[in-house]
Amino acid sequence: MFNSKLNTYKIILASGSPRRQQFFRDLNLDFEIRIKEIEEVFPQELKGEAITNYLAELKAAAFEGDLQENEILITSDTLVWHNEKAVGKPTDYDDAVRILKSLSNDTHQVITSVCFKTVEKTETLFDITKVTFNKLSDDQIHYYLENYKPFDKAGAYGIQEWIGFIGVSKIEGSYANVMGLPVDKVFQYLNSLT
């Protein structure tokens, strides 16, 4: 289903996220995983997609000089943007409780940036999805955290899990983006390669 030109590229996914890896498998893409640890720190003046663009590009920059002519590296970063602040992964259980209480009965944005890097160029795209939560009770928050342990997820939740079923009342935009990758945009970009 992909442009035959894509067969001339070796795709490298630089992500340890099981969800992103599964998306790539579900697209029937041949890819290899290469990960480099980087410190995900961004300039404090950045807001919204400027943060995720910066971090996705920072992850790609770690591979500068390592790519071969036929390789395309894909990096990404997702964050929750709420009340003009970036909400990352929780630092611990109590932080996860605080985050979910703040998202309860309110709307936030999930922003994902994807960076495509080759020897010749680097291009970045992003997607924004609005997610509205019902009012979450303390019991619901604790049940979710104790049973699903979403401590590796931006915003302390996975929309594909129990909390998404009972807690999300409305979504505007890409569902896959909330899971960590705007799959439709990645597909369109890869299919546009010439």
Image (cartoon, helix red, strand yellow):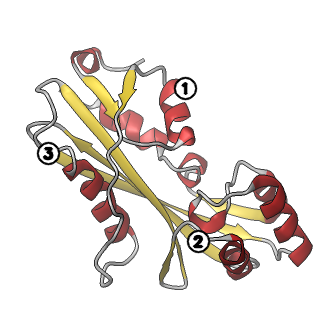
Residue at horizontal 40 percent and vertical 73 percent from the top:
48
Q: Quadrant of the C terminus?
A: top left
Q: Secondary structure at mark 3?
A: loop
In this orientation, which residue lies closer to the viewer: 131 or 117?
117
Spatial CA span between label 3 and label 2: 30 Å
Label 1 close to label 3 by CB (< 8 Å): no
Residue 76 bears which disc, if any? Answer: none
Spatial CA span between label 2 and label 1: 31 Å
Nearer to us: label 2 or label 1: 2
Residue 155 rendering spot, x and y as whole percentages: 60, 67
| Mark 3, residue position | 64
Residue 52 rendering spot, x and y as whole percentages: 37, 63
Q: Secondary structure at mark 2?
A: loop
**In the rendered structure, which disc, 1 or 3, sits on the residue that comes first in sequence?**
1
Instruction: Report crowding for label 2: few under 14, some 14 to 19, many 20 or more residues within 10 A (C-alpha).
Output: few
| Mark 2, residue position | 91
**In the rendered structure, which disc, 2 or 1, sits on the residue that comes first in sequence?**
1
Residue at horizontal 37 percent and vertical 20 percent from the top:
2
In this orientation, which residue lies closer to the viewer: 158 or 142?
142
Label 2 close to label 1 by CB (< 8 Å): no
